[in-house]
Amino acid sequence: MARLPILVAPDPRLKLKAQPVEKVDAPLRRLMDDMLETMYAAPGIGLAAPQVGVSKRVLVIDIAKEGEAKAPLRMANPELLWVSDEDAVYEEGCLSVPEQYADVTRPARIRLRFLDHENEIRELEADGLLATVIQHELDHLEGILFIDHLSSLKRNMILRKLSKSRKSLVGA
Ligand code: NI
């Protein structure tokens, strides 16, 4: 397994719509495992392939808390089948928008279909944090970041902070 570099906004590759995969084969399983290693190391609870510069509809998630057994989810071609009318608000962050957090409103419960790491079709119902993380990662496959759900005022404030912190990194 290998750790992959994570792209940071406003990298234009984060705005691309990702392409479906044909099937989950050995190279794609390796990508999923590399993404998991990258996510755990960050640390984060979700990562989509576009965040590591791969424009494919692939994502990994693990919302297990520290000290709990790992519970990785590996998904290809995930598709929402249903979302609840009821919404939930979570404070979200993103490995591609480092150290910035904001409340985002999304449907509270969802049902989705995806290909797992063995190329089997699976369906999953999710609520709570998992429903939010899945929707956050699905957004990445459409080139949408959580800050795109905020007012342009808030979004621009965050983007300005990001470009400032990057400049200070280069200067260090
Ligand atoms: Ni993200």
Image (spheres, rainbow, N blue to C red):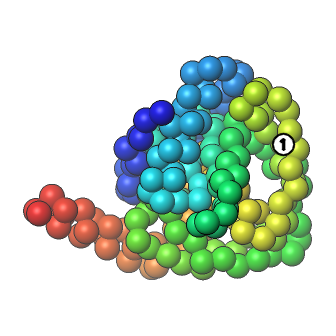
Is 51 positioned to the left or the right of 68 in the image? left
Is 101 positioned to the left or the right of 46 in the image? left
Residue where numbered disc 1 is placed: 113
Query: Identity of the amino acid at label 1?
Result: Arg
The image quadrant where one finds ligand 1 is bottom right
Name the outermost residue toward the left: 171
Residue 105: give x, y in percent of width and height.
Answer: 69, 75
Dot 1 alpha-carbon crowd within 10 angstroms: few under 14, some 14 to 19, many 20 or more: some
Dot 1: element: strand
Residue 163: give x, y in percent of width and height.
Answer: 27, 65
Question: How many numbered marks are there?
Answer: 1
Tell me what residue is drawn at x 59 percent, y 59 percent: 45
Give the camera-side residue of 3 and 16: 3
Tell me what residue is drawn at x 15 percent, y 58 percent: 170
Q: Is residue 79 above or below residue 117?
A: below
Tell me what residue is drawn at x 52 percent, y 69 percent: 93
Q: Is residue 38 above or below residue 98?
A: above
Location of the C terminus (image quadrant): bottom left
Tell me what residue is drawn at x 70 percent, y 52 percent: 71
Residue 20: give x, y in percent of width and height.
Answer: 67, 30
Q: Is residue 32 visible?
A: yes
